[in-house]
Image (cartoon, rainbow, N blue to C red):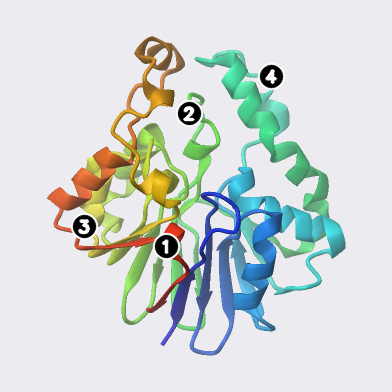
């Protein structure tokens, strides 16, 4: 039986999962920041890392991986393959048809250039994910349901998140990365018949995320929240989402705090919520 670990936060609202297969191989999802690496190494141990999946290039998700790769080529991990599909910086930096230029450039420059500086260090271990790709690692099956789509510029990096479903003979988990409302609409349009899963990783830490329709299609029995307790208990309209005029101009009006998402999950009858701010979660899957 496989095991899933959702690691608790060493750095705030980071995302880090480790899956251990029946044959004692490891799968890592994101991993968090540099300060999260000691905890990640503890749970991975000396196992072969058959897949390290990077959902999107934000610091709270992949700066730990980038640090380790730049430091010593990830020598502390026995790494087979890195799976990702990031937006093309050189093409997008020239894009003019965007709703909020300042935010768009901030998103492009926040971490992607640092990743690009070291990506050749593991070129021979790289698999650039295409939508529909399937991989099998021991008894664990993974299908990638979504990669970035051209034109989703209001919420650039989050809407470029990889979405994938992980299945074992016992259960299934849908990973949504940091997908936002627009990316979620495309996911629902293209793959709604594949979204059903026993567990769901709440998109973008549970706030400013995909729509109720996506979660309804998933119909999970339990949720994984990569969130500190203050974020898990966030109001419907936190202060940073109060400026409706700006949100309209920026194309980000369909964004709310976690209170809205939690109401959706209540309406769907979800009874169990795992929150990383409460500690590391361990489940048999």
Looking at the rendered image, the quarter that the C terminus falls into is bottom left
Residue 85 in view (yes/no): no
C-alpha span from label 4 to label 3: 40 Å
Q: State whether residue 264 is above or below residue 68.
A: above
> Going from the N terminus, do you reach mark 4 or mark 3 first?
4
Q: Secondary structure at mark 3?
A: loop
Residue 31, located in which quarter of the rendered image? bottom right
* Residue nearest the observer in this picture, 141 or 209: 209
Closer mark to the observer between disc 2 and disc 3:
3
* Residue nearest the observer in this picture, 275 or 160: 275
Q: Is residue 175 left or right of residue 161?
A: left
C-alpha span from label 3 to label 1: 24 Å
Which dot marks residue 219? 3
> Going from the N terminus, do you reach mark 2 or mark 4 first?
4
Crowding near the residue tagged with mark 1, few <14, some 14–19, many ≥20 C-alpha atoms within 10 Å: few
> Going from the N terminus, do you reach mark 3 or mark 1 first?
3
Q: Is residue 282 left or right of residue 33?
A: left
Closer mark to the observer between disc 1 and disc 2:
1
Which dot marks residue 94? 4
Where does label 2 land, which residue?
Answer: 152
Residues at badges 4 and 3 in contact (C-beta under 8 Å)?
A: no
C-alpha span from label 2 to label 4: 15 Å
Q: Secondary structure at mark 1?
A: helix
* Residue nearest the observer in this picture, 71 or 238: 238
> Going from the N terminus, do you reach mark 1 or mark 2 first?
2
C-alpha span from label 2 to label 3: 26 Å
Residue 143 placed where, x, y %? 44, 62
């Amino acid at each position: 039986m496989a095991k899933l670990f959702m690691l608790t936060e060493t750095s705030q609202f980071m995302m880090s999962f480790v899956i251990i297969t029946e044959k004692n191989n490891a799968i890592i999802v994101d991993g968090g920041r540099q300060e999260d690496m000691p905890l990640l190494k503890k749970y991975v141990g000396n196992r072969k890392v058959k897949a390290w999946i990077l959902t999107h290039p934000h610091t709270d998700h992949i700066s730990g991986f980038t640090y380790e790769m730049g430091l010593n080529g990830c020598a502390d991990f026995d790494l087979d393959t890195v799976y990702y599909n990031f937006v093309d910086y050189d093409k997008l930096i020239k894009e003019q048809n965007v709703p909020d230029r300042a935010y768009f450039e901030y998103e492009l420059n926040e971490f992607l250039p640092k990743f690009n500086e070291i990506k050749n260090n593991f070129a021979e271990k790289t698999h650039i994910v295409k939508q529909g790709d399937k991989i099998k690692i021991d008894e664990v099956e993974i299908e990638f349901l979504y990669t970035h789509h051209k034109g989703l510029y209001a919420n650039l990096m989050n809407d470029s998140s990889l979405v994938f479903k992980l299945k074992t003979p016992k259960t299934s988990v849908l990973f949504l990365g940091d997908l936002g409302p627009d990316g979620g609409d495309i996911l629902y349009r293209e793959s709604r018949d594949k979204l059903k899963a026993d567990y769901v990783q709440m998109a973008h830490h549970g706030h400013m995320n995909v729509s109720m329709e996506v979660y309804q299609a998933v119909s999970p029995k339990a949720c994984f929240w990569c969130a500190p307790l203050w974020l898990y208990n966030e109001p419907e309209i936190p202060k940073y989402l109060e400026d409706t005029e700006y949100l309209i101009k920026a194309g980000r009006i369909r964004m709310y705090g976690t209170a809205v998402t939690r109401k959706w999950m209540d309406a769907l009858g979800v009874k169990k919520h795992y929150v990383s701010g409460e500690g590391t979660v361990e489940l048999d899957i």
